[in-house]
Amino acid sequence: MYRYLVIIEKGETSYGAYAPDVPGCVAVGDTHEEVEQAMREALVMHFQAMRADHDPIPAPAASAEYIEFSLPEVVK
């Protein structure tokens, strides 16, 4: 089983996804669920092509965190 960070972004009319550790592997879908499934399929196809070309599979290294911060009040 493989585990890679996937970023899913909501656009105006659809969703997009990419994996920071796998350049060039992207997916789109009409819903969050569709893009998630499309990205799974895209990763499998991408890695199968890499294996066929005898390219190394990149190790997952990216991480994500939500960072809390506050903005100072604007003084007028």
Image (cartoon, rainbow, N blue to C red):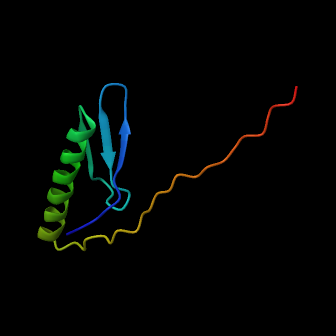
Query: Which quadrant would the N terminus be assigned to in this image?
Result: bottom left
Residue at image location 44% in from the left, 62% down from the top: 63
Q: How many marks?
A: 0
The one nearer the camera, 52 or 33, is 33
Residue at image location 70% in from the left, 43% down from the top: 70
The picture places residue 6, in percent across and down from the top left corner, at 33, 53
The one nearer the camera, 47 or 2, is 2
Q: Residue furthest right?
A: 76
Q: Is residue 40 left or right of residue 73?
A: left
Q: Quadrant of residue 32?
A: top left
Residue at image location 42% in from the left, 63% down from the top: 62
The answer to whether 16 is drawn above or below residue 42 in the figure is above
Q: Is residue 38 left or right of residue 3?
A: left
The one nearer the camera, 62 or 47, is 62
Residue at image location 20% in from the left, 53% down from the top: 40
Q: Quadrant of residue 23?
A: bottom left
Query: Which quadrant would the C terminus be assigned to in this image?
Result: top right
The picture places residue 13, in percent across and down from the top left corner, at 31, 25
The one nearer the camera, 75 or 47, is 75
The answer to whether 68 is drawn above or below residue 62 in the figure is above
Q: Quadrant of residue 11?
A: top left
The answer to whether 56 is drawn above or below residue 46 in the figure is below
The picture places residue 25, in percent across and down from the top left corner, at 27, 53
